[in-house]
Amino acid sequence: MMNPKRIGVYGGTFDPVHNAHLEIARAARRCAALDVVLIVVAARPPHKENETFATPEDRMAMVKAAVLDEAGMESSDVEMRREGPSYTSQTLVELHEHYPESELYLIIGMDSLADLPKWKDPETILEHAELLVVPRPGNGTAAPDMVAGKYCVIPFEETDISSTEIRVRIARGTPIDDVVPAAVEALIHERGIYE
């Protein structure tokens, strides 16, 4: 990545990464004229401790496969290289140090925006990144006062695709080719990730 000026930071467990994740990254890129969106795999998500199904390495491999042919998207192992829980505030500080000339844009769901005051060091997050917020199906949650005027909602058609539903489909032997990129599906079957 050559000196991007506007970097989207899209973190998650991606267990597995699916088509809606990629659509969100594309929508954020268009909305904020981002040079690149970094898909950051949360190695040890503090809010989902012991709740991930695939290993961090398998989730990283799936994200790499998903973005291989996607213009303006890159996988990032910034949280995998760090010990301890994967805190967004630390990730943004680290990315800011690595790309001091760049503007960072954190891509989160409306549900996460509502919870932001409970995250670790929310002030650090707001200090280091603009927020790009994705609407969630049926989410009428109000934004907390601390983010007033500090976020922009991405125009995005809400979807009910979820990683949970995809894992259920895999367990039932139901096809998943309509909800994940072909390269991700191939990797899941090849490595037997959710079997």
Image: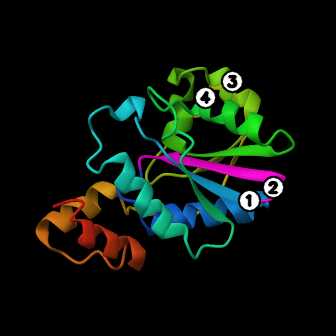
Disc number lying in front (3 or 2): 2
Label 1 to label 4, Cα distance in Å? 21 Å
Q: Position of residue 194 (x, y in %)?
A: 21, 59
Disc number lying in front (2 or 1): 1
Contact (Cβ within 8 Å) of mark 2 with mark 1? yes
Q: Position of residue 73 (x, y in %)?
A: 63, 64
Looking at the image, can residue 30 be seen?
A: yes
Contact (Cβ within 8 Å) of mark 4 with mark 3? no
Residue identified by numbered label 3: 124
Determine whether, in the image, residue 129 is placed left or right of residue 5.
left
Q: Quadrant of residue 2?
A: bottom right
Disc number lying in front (1 or 4): 1
Question: Does label 4 or label 3 sit earlier along the sequence?
Answer: 4
Q: Would you place residue 167 above or below residue 143 in this image?
A: below
Residue identified by numbered label 4: 90
Residue identified by numbered label 2: 4
Q: Could you tell me the amino acid type at mark 1?
A: Met
Determine whether, in the image, residue 179 is placed left or right of residue 50.
right
Label 3 to label 2, Cα distance in Å? 22 Å
**Label 1: few (<14), some or many (≥20) within 10 Å?**
few
Residue identified by numbered label 1: 1
